[in-house]
Image (cartoon, rainbow, N blue to C red):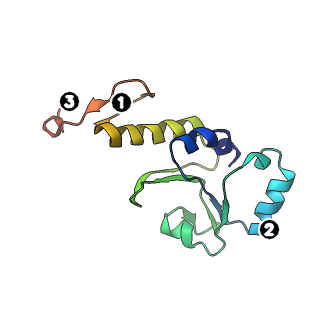
Amino acid sequence: MAAVAAIYPPLKQLNAEVLGISTDSVYSHKVFKEISPSARKVQYPLVSDRNHRISRAYRVLDEDAGASFRATVIVSPEGTIAAKVIYPREVGRNSYELLRMLQGIQYGRETNQGVPANWVPGMPGIARRTEDIGRI
């Protein structure tokens, strides 16, 4: 959550709504924000998913552990999943890649172009040409 807090202002500039959802209780969230210096920087709502409904709905629940995997889900304004990344337990999020992914999704929506590997804002997109599908 703290890594996302570092890019919260640019996410808000992109009109993104950010929620931190975990299977921890609201009491755990409160203590976490009180004792963790990095958690104090979190400016977005923390949501408790103690009943696992949200984690199951997004298919990020580790049933054996009774907790969700570390995941990022980007939901479009229409309510569909535009992107979902599930991270291995050993690997933390790359918040700048999350920001780049959201920028790329929004660029594609605005221009009807795709974005190439390692694209960053300011670079050109790729025309989506169905006649090129399957060609090398």
Q: Position of residue 61 (x, y in %)?
A: 56, 65
Q: Quadrant of residue 116?
A: top left
**Residue 27: assigned label:** 2
Decide: is 129 above or below 73.
Answer: above
Q: Amino acid at mark 2?
A: Tyr
Q: Residue at x 49, y 64 (%)?
A: 59
Q: CA distance from mark 2 to mark 1?
A: 43 Å
Q: Residue at x 63, y 50 (%)?
A: 89
Q: Position of residue 33 (x, y in %)?
A: 80, 55
**How many residues crowd around disc 1 within 10 Å: few (fewer than 14), some, or many (20 or more)?**
few
**Residue 40: assigned label:** none
Q: Which residue in the structure is indicated by mark 3?
A: 136
Q: Position of residue 93 (x, y in %)?
A: 60, 43
Q: Which residue in the structure is indicated by mark 1?
A: 116
Q: Secondary structure at mark 1?
A: loop
3 or 1: mark nearer the eye? 1
Q: Position of residue 85 (x, y in %)?
A: 50, 49
